[in-house]
Amino acid sequence: MLILTCPCCGVSAEETEFSNGGEAHLKRFGPGSSDDDFESYMFNRKNPRGVHFERWRHAYGCGKWFIAARCTVTLEVFATYPAQTTEPPADVVKKIKARRSEWEGFA
Amino acid sequence: MSEPVSALGGAQYAGMVELAEAGPRGMITVRGDLALPALASAVKKITGAAMPARRQASTGAKGAVAWMSPDELLLFVDYAAAAPSVAALEAALAGEFVTIADVSDARAVLTLKGSQACDVLAKICPVDFADLPVGGIRRSRAAQIAAAIWREEQDEYTVICFRSHARYMWDMLSQLARPGGEVGLYR
């Protein structure tokens, strides 16, 4: 069971109030991109064991999307932050590093 | 003009808590930038209530206004006042990027009163009601349906759900409020 704090409305709630939207920070490759790039964008996911960035929607609450940084092994939630970012903000990276010093960083 | 018909015909139930359907209520959804000064003054004019803070609802002489999300408000007025209020809001906010909709007949409003009210709600909502202050509103889930729970007084709650879910909500709450089902979690 995850307890997530929605950065849009500030509510801390358990995961059944949210819905998962898959891996966050994907770079879209649309029309005109190479087949390899498109295939990678369309199908390839990191599926890491450890630190993971996920999109979540506060479906039963304010209805907004946000991103959660969490550990897929321990379910520890490091931080949640607004979805209008293309990579994890510096303070989130710092929080993760403090908890998982072996983490190689966002790539 | 035809009489308004609420979802449950003003049903009432007295058990662990006093449960009632609030009957026809004028409700208006406003979506847009909540920081607009024109919005605050229009809301004040229609409901008499000030703009609510985040996750709060405020009450005025003619109605109430609840914060539903960072860009959404729900205004409560008399049922008959809903249509003129929508027109007044549209006039006051002409040219601004907002959407205004009369949702009076799209929602059902139930009230719970009594010292066990939050225990009854806590049976179906993943919410810690100790964190919900008086005057606060919390959108969440009640069993399988979406609900907004507004704590109007210490032991008085207003539950808002979709009209089509009203019977489900009613059957569930009246079942959970049967005497003998006290949990005593919040005392």
Image (cartoon, helix red, strand yellow):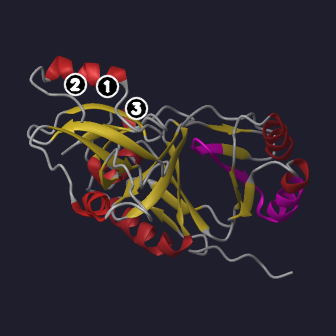
Query: Which residue lies under the disc numbered 2?
Result: A96
Query: Which residue lies under the disc numbered 3?
Result: B131
Secondary structure state at the residue bearing disc 1: helix
Q: Quadrant of residue A67?
A: top left
Between A13 and A40, the residue placed more toward the observer is: A40
Cβ atoms under marks 3 and 1 closer than 8 Å: no
A103, above or below B111, in the image: above
Secondary structure state at the residue bearing disc 3: helix
User: Is residue A9 toward the left or the right of residue B58 in the image?
Assistant: left
Rate crowding at label 3 as few (under 14), some (14 to 19) or many (20 or more) other CA atoms within 10 Å.
Answer: few
Cβ atoms under marks 1 and 2 closer than 8 Å: yes
| Residue type, label 2 | Ile
Tell me the quarter of the image containing the N terminus of chain B.
bottom right
Instruction: Confirm whether circles 3 and 1 share one chain.
Output: no
Cβ atoms under marks 3 and 2 closer than 8 Å: no
Instruction: Confirm whether circles 1 and 2 share one chain.
Output: yes
| Residue type, label 1 | Val
- Which residues are the magenta region? B66-88
Q: Chain under label 1?
A: A
Give the image location of residue B129, x and y in percent: 38, 38
Closer to us: mark 3 or mark 1?
1
Query: Which residue lies under the disc numbered 1?
Result: A92
Give the image location of residue B122, x and y in percent: 33, 48
Between A95 and A64, the residue placed more toward the observer is: A95
Give the image location of residue B158, x and y in percent: 54, 51
CA gap between label 3 and label 2 equals 28 Å
